[in-house]
Amino acid sequence: MPLLEVSDLTIQLPTRRGLVQAVRHVGFALERGATLGLIGESGCGKSLTALALMGLLPEQARVSGSIRLDGQELLGLSERRLCALRGNRMAMVFQEPMTALNPLHGIGRQVAEPLRLHLGLGRRAAQARAVELLERVGIAQAAQRFGEYPHQFSGGQRQRITIAMALACGPDLLIADEPTTALDVTVQQQILALLQELVAEHSMALVLISHDLGVIAQNAEQLLVMYGGSVVESGMTEAVFRQRAHPYTRGLFAARPQMLPAAARPPGHLPTIAGTVPELADLPAGCPFAGRCAFTAQACFAQAPAPRLLQAPAGPAPASLAFWRQPHVVRCLRDEAIHAGAPETTP
């Protein structure tokens, strides 16, 4: 049984224009020790999906579907039971560590808090363990800096402290939401290497959210490509990056800056995806990418594309296309025509 199973996850949010679907029928599964990447531009639903896993959505949000952690259904659990899981069996590293850390408390106290709350450790035992965790994530002289405040640390150090907090109780599931945003390249690589090392060491499952294709390529075995709250392509990272079956996936790759010699650079500007991301209330009933896609047909606006398996899995087929062992799934009405070389159409 996978550690994490998500099926038909749909999130509705109230707006001035009524309820809108911010996440649409998302499904995936994740084994222990595996890393799943969620990729897509801002507003595609990556962070909302992560917040749903943690039970941290706004009170007004309406959620349907299923989220199962080690067989236990999380949707519908009381806040008391969710609090017993958060920070214990599942934890999250947030995008901005300065807002994730309490500026009024020393960093050591914040790392020790889940140890006392979930594991019942006494003050001295929790402090000793917190120092070990801070040292493990690379905070030098952790014992001496135990009582210092978040503003006394650099951005990279604060991110390491949030990782120490998340790992304090040895969670089964770790969610990292853009954990390297606003960090320089050297610190970014250190943080990502640390996450991978800790996942392997503790056999955790990791959900890594990023808009950076390079980060996902280097750190995730499998991925979901999201647009407009929907998963448009999913599978093993190598297979998806090699084939790029969905037009949106192709657009992301085409817009990626490349370090090429001047003589090898293509003429003109860096390619971009045409149009702009529509408001959630304006998304079409069919494919969310309809209208921005150069291959849009009339049916794309009205008919939601069903998942199509591009590569048969080894062994018996699982019951659901959401299961991650099916390597490569695309949701596009025109993917066969696109790969057959059909001409682009005008939306």
Image: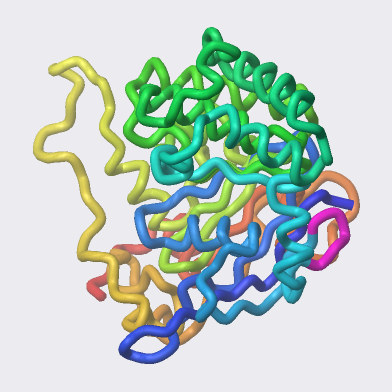
In the picture, which quadrant includes the C terminus? Answer: bottom left
Q: Locate residue 209, reporting x and y percent.
A: 51, 45
Using the image, determine if residue 260 lies above or below residue 110. Answer: above
Q: Locate residue 317, reporting x and y percent.
A: 85, 57
**Residue 128, quarter of picture:** top right
Tell me if 254 is positioned left or right of 107 in this view: left
**Is residue 211 visible in the rendered structure shown here?**
no
What residue do we see at 60% from left, 20% from top?
Answer: 134
Tell me if 252 is positioned left or right of 140 in this view: left
Tell me if 265 is positioned left or right of 241 in this view: left
Magenta part mainly helix, strand or loop? strand
What residue do we see at 56% from left, 52% from top?
Answer: 224
Could you say which is closer to the camera, residue 311 or residue 86?
86
**Is residue 163 visible in the rendered structure shown here?**
yes
Span shown in magenta? 69-73
Counting labels gives: 0
What residue do we see at 27% from left, 43% from top?
Answer: 255
**Residue 68, quarter of picture:** bottom right
Residue 199 in magenta stretch: no
Q: Locate residue 83, reporting x and y percent.
A: 71, 58
Q: Locate residue 42, reporting x and y percent.
A: 35, 55
Tell me if 35 is positioned left or right of 155 in this view: right
Residue 71 in magenta stretch: yes
Residue sitting farthest toward the top: 141
What residue do we see at 64% from left, 38% from top?
Answer: 166
Could you say which is closer to the camera, residue 264 or residue 322?
322
